[in-house]
Amino acid sequence: SPHLPILPIPSCPASWDEMQAWFRRAIQTGQNLAIAYPPPPTESPTDIWQHLVGIAKYLSRTGKMVTRAQLSETLGIGDRPLQIGFRTLKRFGFEVTSSEEGVHFTWQPEPTLEYGEMAEAIAPFFSVVQEEQFRRRYFYEVPLATIQAAAYQLIRT
């Protein structure tokens, strides 16, 4: 209906489950869903990793906290890559503490991994970021008719 308020999807989803959550929210709130998200970020997994390490070092040095949502938005990654990123940071001497207030980083800068081990430690993070970027590109490029068909399917069930 053209007179309903609009519920915009702020960023490109990475799964049909995520898209269905938006469909449900629009139905529950009686809003039209606006599928007009910007293109997904194209930053390389290496750049995202370096950005995450830089943020973690800065927050460790300053003692400040950040929310998971802020980290996800700043890095352009979802929750799963963020979790893998936290796990990877721990292998590089970071202590990552997550609470309701936010995420806190403490860094003990001591070389714990050899160079070959470093590449091996980062590989799962790179892999999950690449997979998520692939999925987001799919949802950015998928025809609107396909999304509409999925929404109608959800409404009928």
Image (spheres, grey):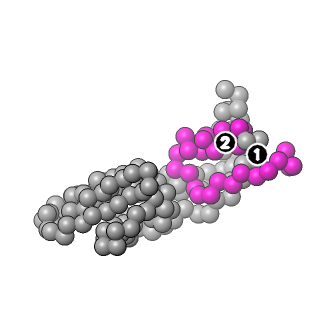
37 relative position to 89: left or right:
right
19 relative position to 47: left or right:
right
Residue under the point 21% across and 58% down: 91
Circle 2/circle 1 CB separation < 8 Å: yes
Q: Which residue is mark 2?
A: 25
Residue situated furthest top in the rendering: 157
Q: In this view of the protein, can residue 32 be seen by the observer?
A: yes
Q: In this view of the protein, can residue 53 be seen by the observer?
A: no
- Above-or-below relation of 95 to 145: below
Image coordinates for residue 13, horizontal then vertical, percent? 56, 51
Residue under the point 39% across and 51% down: 99
Residue situated furthest right in the rendering: 3
- Determine which quarter of the picture holds residue 102: bottom left
Q: Quadrant of the N terminus?
A: top right
Q: Residues within 10 Å of mark 2 (few under 14, many from 20)?
A: some
Q: Earlier in the sequence, mark 2 or mark 1?
A: 2
Image coordinates for residue 145, horizontal then vertical, percent? 70, 45
Q: Is residue 34 magenta?
A: no
User: Judging from the image, what secondary structure is the residue with disc 1 in?
Assistant: loop
Mark sitting on residue 31: 1
Residue under the point 14% across and 63% down: 113
Q: The magenta stretch spans which residues?
A: 1-28
In front here: 94 or 73?
94
In front here: 13 or 70?
70
- Above-or-below relation of 76 to 151: below
